[in-house]
Amino acid sequence: MEERWQEKDSALAITIVWALWTNKNDICHGGLRKNGKQIFHWCTQYLDEYWAATAIPIKYNLPLESRWVPPFDLFYKVNVDGAVFSSQKQAGIGVIIRDSQGNLIVGLSKKLNAPLGAIEAEAKAFEEGIVFACDVGIQNFVVEGDCLAIVQALCDVSPAPLSVAPLVYGTMPATYGSQCVNFSHVQWQGNRSALLLAKNALGIDDYVASIEESLFS
């Protein structure tokens, strides 16, 4: 199999076998039986998240900032993050916009009533961040998140994970009305405010936009 197949094909086959065995054990202990489509979707999503977590840049290394860094003058920085609420079959999106002096402009918490995986929530966060920035009238901004695979795809460094490729590449047209939009990566420590807003979405019905500093502390 290793001689005939590519690494990702072999990984998918092995993961499907593992998922079938796991589901059989779940059924024996009173769990639900998953059909073939559900198992295949779970396997592809699981592998997408694995490849995203272990992705290696193929052209150049993006800066691995561990703290928030202000954007250039006349630019804004739009930090985004996603959170998954598995038991509720929902997800949350957090967006926080600051200017070049580090001043808070506006923040957004938004709930998505969909059972998204981690990589899907991250991709959706980038889309929501761009749309939100455009809605508040910002023309020059940097969209920043802690998912390296998504940032690399948006920077055209490496392909997007398969399960979110349509969403990632479909995000770009939303930037066309802006003057200049860039993308950057930051480690989770520098993206904490966006993550807090994403988690805050669990307690709301739809979305909340606010300029209150207390939401981000």
Image: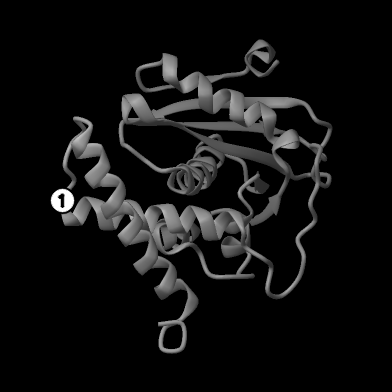
Q: Quadrant of residue 188?
A: top right
Give the SS element for disc 1.
loop
The amino acid sitting under disc 1 is Asn
Question: Would residue 80 be found to the left or right of residue 192 on screen?
Answer: left
Graded by Cα atoms within 10 Å as few (under 14), some (14 to 19) or many (20 or more), the crowding at tag 1 reads few
Residue 109 placement (x, y as % from top left): 50, 25
Q: Name the residue: 83% across, 47% down.
A: 72
* Residue 198 in sight: yes
Q: Nearer the viewer, residue 180 or 113?
A: 113
* Position of the N terminus by quadrant: bottom left
Q: Nearer the viewer, residue 165 or 54?
A: 54
Q: Name the residue: 18% across, 56% down.
A: 36
Q: Nearer the viewer, residue 86 or 78?
A: 86
Residue 12 placement (x, y as % from top left): 38, 66
Q: Is residue 144 above or below residue 167?
A: above
Q: Is residue 186 above or below residue 87?
A: below
Residue designated by label 1: 35
Residue 5 placement (x, y as % from top left): 42, 83
In the orientation shown, which residue stands out farthest toward the top? 214
* Position of the C terminus by quadrant: top right
Question: Would residue 180 be found to the left or right of residue 111 on screen?
Answer: right
